[in-house]
Amino acid sequence: MNLKLVGKIVKSMALSEVNNDRGELRILENLDELRTDLADYIAELSEAAVKERGVFAIALSGGSLIDLMGKLCGAPYNKTIDWAKWYIFWADERVVAKNHSDSNYKLAKDGLLSKVPIVPSHVHSINDSVSAEEAADEYMFVIRQLVKTRMVSVSDISDCPKFDLILLGMGPDGHIASLFPNHSALDETDEWVTFIIDSPKPPPERITFTLPVINSASNVAMVVTGERKAEAVHLAIDNIGPDCPSLPARLVQPTKGKLVWFLDKPAASKLDGLQFSDGKFGIHFVRREKTNKSWESQCKRFSVV
Ligand SMILES: O=C(O)[C@H](O)[C@@H](O)[C@H](O)[C@H](O)COP(=O)(O)O
């Protein structure tokens, strides 16, 4: 067993680790720290995209994510972010009326979009007055038009849209967006957006980005909190060998983009060999894992205590 790294959680700083092809791991001491780190991360990506392309195309999900993005509505972000350049999409949406309490649009509108100066015509939600299938087709058409005008970039290795950032939550079963374990929607590679009418998580009818679109993004953030998701986090991130189940969250592997996991300590608690302990300088993090890389080279990227 090799000691892989020793890190330190400093106030207002995420503990970061690059975990092979499973992306960057940021384990935050508590939800407040996670909210701050997530807001900083989104603000930085927004600034970089606006500088490079003049716009920021961001896709949201439902669930606890919007609440965890809440710091964006306050200082300094409400003033420093160039909100007029944001183009908003949904990685998945429940096929219900926009004013329904299950609507991801309503969740985002109430929790974020109505509190910052977003341009209303930049908000691309689904048509809520048609079937799931039609809503998926129409949504794909809208995205196609925006790809043509490069409001949304295009992947240089496929014809997929390349969102600047796709934000995903994860369920305890490892689902992401509305891509559930063992569901045929996971195999959809021809369409950018697909629909399901049998979601195991209510409501049953949903539209969702497909895996090729998610994996074409420039940045994908997985935002996962709480102990009940710890097992799925372990299965999605750790090296669990050839028997690895095809957990949707494990299939998030941006081809050229960057994947970052935002976890609180309970969600990270079943990661291989992870230990937290109180020390002179704060909370320490130790992770033991099978690795070929030397302890020294791993530690160069971290504040070693
Ligand atoms: O609309 C949805 O249901 C979602 O987009 C879904 O993928 C969600 O992100 C996860 O289920 C996590 O939800 P929680 O963070 O609330 O557990």
Image (cartoon, rainbow, N blue to C red):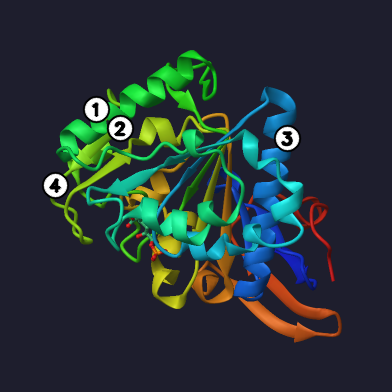
Determine the CA span between mark 3 and mark 4.
38 Å
Residue 193: assigned label: 2
- Please name the residue shown 52% across and 25% down the image: 152
Determine the CA span between mark 3 and mark 1.
31 Å
Q: Looking at the image, do the residues carrying marks 2 and 4 touch, with CB atoms under 8 Å apart?
A: no
Q: Quadrant of ligand 1?
A: bottom left
Q: Looking at the image, do the residues carrying marks 3 and 1 touch, with CB atoms under 8 Å apart?
A: no
Q: Check the picture and name the quadrant holding the N terminus.
A: bottom right
Under mark 2, the amino acid is: Val
Q: Nearer the viewer, mark 4 or mark 1?
A: 1
Residue 74 in the image, given as x and y percentages of width and height: 68, 62
Determine the CA span between mark 2 and mark 3.
27 Å
Q: Is mark 3 within 8 Å of ligand 1?
A: no
Query: Which residue is labeled 3 in the image?
Result: 48
- Please name the residue shown 30% across and 32% down the image: 193
Q: Describe the element under mark 1 as helix, strand or loop.
A: helix
In the rendered picture of this protein, how many numbered marks are placed on residues? 4
Query: Which residue is labeled 1 in the image?
Result: 137
Q: Residues within 10 Å of mark 3 (few under 14, many from 20)?
A: some
Determine the CA span between mark 2 and mark 4.
14 Å
Q: Residues within 10 Å of mark 4 (few under 14, many from 20)?
A: some
Q: Is residue 88 left or right of residue 5?
A: left
Residue 189 in the image, given as x and y percentages of width and height: 29, 27
User: Earlier along the polypeptide chain: callout 4 or callout 1?
Assistant: 1
Residue 93 in the image, given as x and y percentages of width and height: 31, 47
Q: Describe the element under mark 3 as helix, strand or loop.
A: helix
User: Earlier along the polypeptide chain: callout 3 or callout 4?
Assistant: 3
Q: Residues within 10 Å of mark 2 (few under 14, many from 20)?
A: many
Q: Check the picture and name the quadrant holding the C terminus.
A: bottom right
Q: Describe the element under mark 2 as helix, strand or loop.
A: strand
